[in-house]
Amino acid sequence: MLDKIHVPVHNSYDIILKRGLLAECGSLIRDLELTSAQHFVIITDDNVDQFYSETVIRSLQDAGFQAEKFVFPHGESSKSAENLLKIYSFLCQQEITRSDCLIALGGGVVGDITGFAAATFLRGISYIQIPTSLLAQVDSSVGGKTAIDLPEGKNLVGAFKQPCAVLCDFNVLKTLPREFLIDGMGEVIKYGMIADPDLFRKLEHYDLDSITDHFEEIIPACIQIKRDVVAEDELDNGLRMILNFGHTLGHAIEAYYHYGTYTHGCAVAAGMCLITKYCGNPEEYTRLSACVRRYQLPTDTDLSVSVQELIPLCGNDKKRAGQDLRYIVCSPIGTAKIRRDTLPEFRKNFQINF
């Protein structure tokens, strides 16, 4: 069965959800007129490439499209200016024009850098998201945020660029290594915390072994929350900041460990727990930390890391507004509030070291 979730932003598009979609993506693009492009470049990483690139290329070619692929090493370190320039060079070599289209086939790193390439190459060409990780399906593929990292911080250079479609195939999640499933659950729990107490209660009763049986319920629920938030605040000037619950500290944790020790979802989970522990109330922290542990996510960081070491890294976060730092607290669960403090005021929330 083909399901659609419409995203009513300035350049509106549909998120299409279907099991087995990858093998049909070419005909879906053709039949649903998702783009007028006839020439596609698939951008992916070396992990995803071995599983899915040939399926997507074959489907596109069977539908009468021309298709090539660009593959880069997996991992956050590839979301760099150096790798972006390599993508630009490849697009030039393939004689890509503004009437052509990119396809982001992969997880959050692939989606972010492909979207930024699409936003900037030839001053903008179209792209389609085909997310292959749980985190990408519920979060990063939706909403049009694209970026690369700098040594000074994550996602500091980017652009808003909506895709012309997002194609979600639940079947690809069957091949996810367990650590990628765990990683994605960090963002799933976030959606229950910020906007859906019923979703959070369900997550409190599921676990890592049973959660895959509920993806066709859980993934659309997360997508719809993000769709509603993005539709109201496409350019991240207000409400959309609630999607960053756990990210202020989470990004600092990722940066402190040089994007190697903690994956994004794990860092967000720790960030959600820490901000709730110190800025929420004990009951909320108890429930959140228990839920996070059900999915083998961390509730804290290495205790050798001090608040003095993490707080300055929060200062590099893109959610800064002048000298103030904006961060999210969920109290009660299912309701998100935006708080604004100076860095010294933010530091005062934490009475002991992390």
Image (cartoon, rainbow, N blue to C red):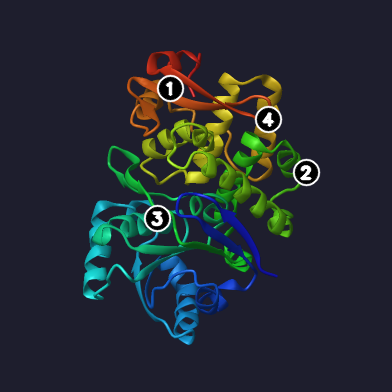
Of the numbered discs 2 and 3, the one sitting upstream in the chain is 3
Residue pictured at 49% horizontal, 34% vertical: 241
Type of the residue with mark 3? Gly
Looking at the image, is mark 4 or mark 3 nearer the viewer? 4
How many dots with numbers?
4
Q: Pointer 3: what residue?
A: 75
Q: Secondary structure at mark 2?
A: helix
Type of the residue with mark 1? Val
Residue pictured at 44% horizontal, 70% vertical: 35
Q: Pointer 4: what residue?
A: 333
Mark 2–mark 1 distance (CA, rounded to whole Å) = 33 Å
Looking at the image, is mark 2 or mark 4 nearer the viewer? 4
Assess disc 2: are there few (<14), some (14-19) or many (≥20) residues with their C-alpha within 10 Å of its C-alpha.
few
Answer whether residue 300 is visible to the viewer in this image.
Answer: no
Q: Pointer 2: what residue?
A: 205
Residue pictured at 69% horizontal, 35% vertical: 290
Image quadrant assignment for residue 73: bottom left
Pointer 2 and pointer 4: residues touching (CB < 8 Å)? no
Of the numbered discs 4 and 3, the one sitting upstream in the chain is 3
Type of the residue with mark 4? Ile
Residue 322 falls left or right of residue 88:
right
Q: Pointer 1: what residue?
A: 307
Of the numbered discs 2 and 4, the one sitting upstream in the chain is 2
Residue 59 point in image, percent of width and height? 50, 81
Mark 2–mark 4 distance (CA, rounded to whole Å) = 16 Å
Type of the residue with mark 2? His
Residue 173 point in image, percent of width and height? 60, 63
